[in-house]
Amino acid sequence: MLCDNCKERDAIINLTQVEHDSKVTLHLCEQCAQQKGVETGGAVLKTPLGNFLGAVVKGTSTAGALVPASGDGMRCPACGSSLRDFRDSGRLGCDQCYVSFDTHLRDLLRRLHGSSQHVGERYALPGEGNGAEGGGTGDDSRSRLLELKAQLRRAVEGENFELAAELRDRIRVLE
Amino acid sequence: MDLSLLPDGGMRWLDASGPKSTIVLSTRIRLARNVRGIPFSQRAKDADRMAVLERVSDAASSSEHLGSAVAFHLDEMDRPERQLLHERHLVSKELAGLERESRPRPGAALLVQDQVGVMVNEEDHLRLHGMWSGFDLEDAYAEVEAVDTELGKLVPFAFHPEFGYLTSCPTNAGTGLRASVLIHLPGLVLTKEINKVLQGLSQVGLTFRGLYGEGSEVVGNFFQLSNQTTLGKTEDELIDHLGKIVRQVIEYEEQARDVLLRTAPEEVEDKTWRAYGLLKHARRMTFEEAMNLLSGVRLGVGLKLLPGPGVYTLNKLLIYTQPAHLAAMDGRSTGDRELPTVRAAFVRRLLEAESS
């Protein structure tokens, strides 16, 4: 099917709009869809076996857009990119951005993943010994500390303050 | 570029030898990593990208897993060749510079050895990936993880004690792991149950995409199911969870196929034979049409309504009927108006040669 707008390229997107209580479906090619502000970044479904899903992803929604504008002026001293740059592009400038914007990112990571605490494989830089599996006592206590901190965060989030107090004390001992 | 340098063209996963390969085409694992101290892709200058490529290439050449890898420098390749690699699922559209007027960035490269590869200078400095035949998350992850462990000892990766592996986009931070399964669900589509299943996925932290991953369309009833979140769970938890849900989806698909066979056996039989007939005899065919007919035949083979062709043949047709592959085989450009004719002729030939 040809695009309803340019009548040149193949239509790949069905855009359903509701105007004045009536439903209008436009069949658009990728270029025309983008001109109309339809983000084609998501998985856009197309199947002749049934119009089972009119999946149209509306508006741009990068991870960056989830960060409040209040910190826009902040810049990462390592790479010079600002929080505003991240809000616009959804991409961070460098590894240090995670430190420079840690408060904002922690909040964002929780919204994206439900947690900001990495509990997967631990990594040791070349020359700094092995990861968690083969690490010495230093590594062990470090990873135990991190695990306790993760538990503490979960306890606070779950308002389990009794457990949180206990965990806090154990963390103090380790630190 | 010489794709013949790659054993099986880098596509051993096509051979349908893996578990559940009638329904699950392939399993893919990807790990996102960045080199510590070098700006991420968004901010990197050409010199930074070249530095990344040099470090990764040096490390790869002294490693066991990538010591004899074939290297493709995308910025030195013509568009049709880059498109070939993309059609083989070896590079993303972004890395291959195939998005509209874009070109590959300097330093954009792919290293491949056996079933694992590394995209260099993609959205992240390194994207390690591996594709396996059928539904085989554990083997695929073990292999890609081994490459990661080895490279991580040679190249310093960006890692944070709280946030884990640091990635250009926070949606990948933590484990950097995206595990995905390319699954064929015609039964659920025909019984109109697919919507429910896909909606259910988002509630359990999974997502779906089209045949070529992010931003691609769903064609031929192929869905790529993968984990949505990458942080707060261990790699094993993420993989176990995806595996559990995929097993459930396979079960739903099998149930849907049973329903079809019970309630509309003649229609289903007719549909699959018609698809087979068109593939065997049509004279012109778009890629999309080929995909949909292949979907019908695959369903017929799965339900034992058709005597052949084999799943391996169907998998090959999925790859080789894509524009860049046909164009390369026939010495044409990818925009050639005769491609639909070339495609139909190729499908007829392959089915003739490989049908029992």
Image (spheres, coloured by chain):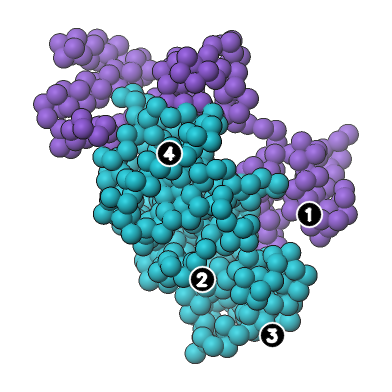
Chain colours: A purple, B cyan
Mark 4 touching mark 3, by CB under 8 A? Answer: no
**Residue shown at 32% from the left, 45% from the top:** B59
**Residue shown at 58% from the left, 10% from the top:** A73
| Residue B245 in sight | no
How far, Cα to Cα, is label 1 from label 4? 40 Å
Helix, strand or loop at mark 4: helix
Quarter of the image where the N terminus of chain A is located: bottom right
Q: Chain of mark 2?
A: B
Q: Nearer the viewer, residue B334 or B135?
A: B334
Which residue is under mark 2? B315
Label located before the other in sequence (2 or 4): 4
Which residue is under mark 4? B52
Query: Tag 2: Cα neighbours inside 10 Å, few (<14), some, or many (≥20)?
Result: some
Quarter of the image where the C terminus of chain A is located: top left
Which amino acid type is marked by label 1? Answer: Ala
- Same chain for marks 1 and 3? no
Mark 2 touching mark 1, by CB under 8 A? Answer: no
Helix, strand or loop at mark 3: helix
Which amino acid type is marked by label 2? Answer: Asn
| Residue B88 in sight | yes
Which residue is under mark 1? A11
How far, Cα to Cα, is label 2 from label 1? 27 Å
How far, Cα to Cα, is label 4 from label 3? 50 Å
Q: Using residue A118 as the reference point, say whether residue A20 is left or right of it.
A: right
How far, Cα to Cα, is label 1 from label 3? 27 Å
Relative image position of residue A162 (x, y in whole percent): 25, 11
Q: Using residue A162 as the reference point, say whether residue B37 is left or right of it.
A: right
